[in-house]
Amino acid sequence: MASTNSNHPGRGLRHGLAAAAAGIGQAAAATGKATAAAVRHPGDTIDRARKVTRALPVAWHSVKPTLTGRVDDWRREYAYTLGQQAFVYGFPYLYNAELRHRWVTQKPETETTPYMAVNHFWHARGLWDVSDRAGVSPNIDTLYSWAWADLREEPLILSHPDMGARYFTFELVAFTSDNYDYVGMRATGSQAGDFALIGPGWSGDLPEGVRRTATAPTPWVLIVGRTLVEGEEDLPAVHALQQQYRLTPLHLFGEEGATLPERRDVPVPVDPAEDPLGPWKTLNAALAENPLPTHHDVLLRQFAEIGIGPGLDVEAQPEPVKEGLIRAAATAVPMLEQQLLSGQWAELVNGWRYPQGEVGHYGDDFLRRAAEQSLVGIAVNDPEEAVYLTAFTDDADETLTTGRYELRFEAGSMPPVDAFWSLTAYDEDRNLIPNPINRYSVGDRTRGLVTDEDGGLTLYLQQDSPGPERESNWLPTPQQGIWYAALRMYLPRPEVIDARWHCPPIKRVG
């Protein structure tokens, strides 16, 4: 599943946004039932809704058509249907506006949540383990380095030291959630370098030796850095590299001892719990912040009819329109979540879900951009950088659960990569699985793996040890309950990217 692409520090935000949207529906029903619940379980909701007080006319009118099937104001229904399309279109802008504000201004409750000033890096310091129960399908191969870059005034110079043979990458992500360029082992090489991040409309000269990256389509950019870590003993070396990652405004570049002041003045999203139109106000502000493609004009003219667009005032709309927009905001996030859970984002091969080639660059495919790129994990790597496969079922199409399973790679058919691969198991809550040997993944960097006599590799996926002679190849699974597996392949070869290489199925053997 695509959600395994990172450690997802935005997951809490996603659920907060969904909860806030559900809160709109709760106000409408006055009984604690969200509009989304009415859509999913109408029989459980109609009786409660019929008892609702008419003391909240805006909320009641916004939810009433869902419960009764009757339309009593075309403007409300038009705003609802068009509003859902506008929400899908604008979701990455809304999500990133919330995420930026949280990471820049809100001190985190845990050490795994980023907190950094604008144009400064935040670096993860440790690997995830079973004590982290955030349910984010954590990546335990790399340490992350995140930054929100403001390119409105001038370029920002990203610098890194010589990385030797260590895998690393900096994914450059527009406010739309689409990737627009990379710096790293694959894209620019491992030697020390300085790279200019350039916003739209800037023109000028760069210092000698500074390499230009592609012009960002939006003035705000998210930098997603990943640095390979070879276990706990390797952490000090990775920390030393992270401390040499630099972000320097162009006007300060080259100045000895120059320091960048901490800025935390980012726009404040409107809290949906305080204002049911808050998501739309936040979206309008974010759209005004970031220039939109000219070929979207015809779509934006339609959204403008209901007050959605750069700098527009949704409060100026008639009450029925606002009522429709309230309902649209309440149902859109659950709709996106259902689209993601449908599995339509992937091709199923031997029980493994292969993402489609456009991932990372969905562009005008607004639904997939919102659900499969932004909602699932903030940003998703280009397939050339990394491919993630997930399996929820075995070779008989049965859900993975308590039992003994094997995954066997024939000789010469190991995951074809130019960097590394790893296989991780997660419980049904998307957490790492406690086990007596403290092993949470296996891969081509796992020490002590034993190959079969014919050169193949058999991995044992089960809750109990397969025995001393096989324990080197054991990936522990839960003592009870369902689980799933994620195969991560970094710098995959073309046969992975175009799905000519098929990962063998997970087979139940007991």
Image (cartoon, helix red, strand yellow):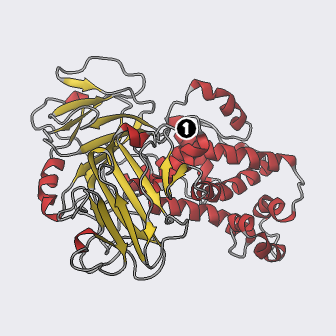
Residue 206, how many percent across, how many down?
A: 24, 20
Q: Determine which quarter of the picture holds residue 86.
A: top right
Count the labels in the image.
1
Q: Position of residue 387 (x, y in %)?
A: 39, 47
Q: Nearer the viewer, residue 321 or 402?
A: 402
The image quadrant that residue 466 belongs to is bottom left
Q: In the displayed structure, does residue 432 sit left or right of residue 472? A: right
Check the image and report above or below for 208 versus 481.
above
Q: Residue at x 75, y 47 (%)?
A: 81
Between residue 394 and residue 387, name the one nearer to us.
394
Residue 245, above or below 232: above
Identified at 24% across, 28% down, the residue is: 250
Which corner quadrant holds the C terminus? bottom left
**Residue 253, located in which quarter of the rendered image?**
top left
Q: Amino acid at mark 1?
A: Leu
| Residue 121 is at least partly visible in this image | no
Q: Residue at x 46, y 46 (%)?
A: 267
Residue 320 lies left or right of residue 175; in this view the side is right
Question: What is the crowding at mark 1: few (fewer than 14 residues within 10 Å), some, or many (at least 20)?
Answer: many
- In front: 65, or 474? 474
Q: Which residue is mark 1?
A: 287
Outermost residue toward the front?
A: 454
Q: Classify 485 as above or below 489.
A: below
- The percent position of residue 122, horizontal first and vertical second, equals 27, 52
Q: Residue furthest left?
A: 256
Answer left or right for 341 relative to 508: right
Give the percent coordinates (x, y) of residue 242.
Answer: 18, 49
Is residue 416 among what the camera can see? yes
